[in-house]
C-alpha cells in the first residue's frame, strides 16, 4: 500500500506543470532562452570564449552553454556576476524582448498561451540573426567606429543595401539611372 502511494505521487508530480521554468512541452521558458541569447550575444560581441567566461564566473564552459541555450535558469546573483564580467547592465539581458516572450514569463504563463507560443518562439527570425557569426562580426566592427556621423552613415548604408536586396529578390526594385553630378566628375 505504501509503495502504491509513492507511485501515485510520482505520477502526479510528473504531470504537473511547473509554475516557474519549462513549458509543458519541456522546452525552456522563452524568457530564460532570451536572457541566454543575450548572454551569448554580449560574450561574442566582446570576443570572449565560453571557457573564458566560465573561468571568470568560476563555472565550467558546459554550464555557460546551458545558460546560453536557456536550458538552465540564471539566478539573480549569477546574472549580477555576468553583468560585471560582460561589462553591461543587468537590464541589458532583458532588452529587445518582444511581447510574446515577455508574456510567457512564469507569472503570466497559462496553458493556452504556452501551446501557441512554443512553435512560434523557437522559430523567431531574431534568433537566427543573433546566431549568425557574420552578424556578430558586423556588430563588433560597427562598435569600433568612434565617429558618430560615420556610424550613422554605415547604418544608413546597411539599411539601404538590405532594402535593395529585398526589393531585388521580390522583383520590385527600380534602380535609378546614374546621372553624373559635379562631385562625381
Image (spheres, helix red, strand yellow):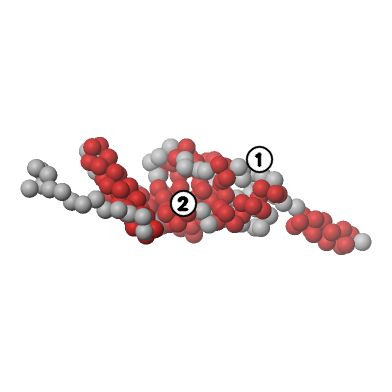
Question: Residue drawn at (26%, 53%), measured in percent from left and top?
Answer: 175
The residue located at (27%, 47%) in the rendering is 157
Residue 28 versus residue 82: which sits nearer the camera? 28
Judged left or right of residue 89, residue 102 is: right
Examine the rendering and report whether any part of residue 60 can be seen: no
**Residue 88, percent across and down?**
40, 40
Looking at the image, which residue is at 47% across and 54% down?
Answer: 125
Residue at mark 2: 126
Q: Residues within 10 Å of mark 1 (few under 14, many from 20)?
A: few
Q: Which residue is mark 1?
A: 107
Percent from the top left, x then y, of residue 160? 30, 48
- The residue under the point 22% across, 41% down is 150
- The residue nearer to you, when weighing 139 against 45, is 139
Question: Horizontal and vertical percent for residue 173?
Answer: 33, 54
From the image, state whether disc 2 or disc 1 is nearer to you.
2
- Residue 106 seen: yes
User: Toward the viewer: 3 or 102?
Assistant: 102
Residue 183 in the image, given as x and y percentages of width and height: 10, 43
Contact check, label 2 and label 1, Cβ < 8 Å: no
Amino acid at each position: 500500500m505504501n509503495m502504491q502511494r509513492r507511485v501515485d505521487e510520482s505520477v502526479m508530480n510528473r504531470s504537473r506543470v511547473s509554475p516557474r521554468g519549462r513549458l509543458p512541452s519541456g522546452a525552456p521558458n522563452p524568457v530564460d532562452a532570451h536572457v541566454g541569447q543575450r548572454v551569448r550575444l554580449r560574450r561574442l560581441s566582446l570576443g570572449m570564449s565560453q571557457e573564458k567566461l566560465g573561468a571568470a564566473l568560476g563555472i565550467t564552459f558546459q554550464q555557460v552553454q546551458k545558460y546560453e541555450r536557456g536550458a538552465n535558469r540564471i539566478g539573480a546573483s549569477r546574472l549580477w556576476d555576468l553583468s560585471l564580467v560582460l561589462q553591461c547592465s543587468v537590464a541589458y539581458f532583458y532588452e529587445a524582448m518582444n511581447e510574446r516572450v515577455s508574456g510567457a514569463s512564469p507569472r503570466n504563463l497559462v496553458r493556452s498561451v504556452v501551446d501557441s507560443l512554443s512553435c512560434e518562439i523557437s522559430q523567431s527570425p531574431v534568433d537566427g540573426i543573433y546566431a549568425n557569426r557574420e552578424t556578430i562580426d558586423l556588430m563588433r566592427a560597427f562598435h569600433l567606429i568612434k565617429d558618430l556621423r560615420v556610424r550613422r552613415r554605415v547604418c544608413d548604408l546597411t539599411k539601404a543595401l538590405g532594402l535593395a536586396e529585398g526589393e531585388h529578390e521580390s522583383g520590385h526594385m527600380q534602380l535609378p539611372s546614374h546621372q553624373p553630378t559635379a562631385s562625381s566628375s
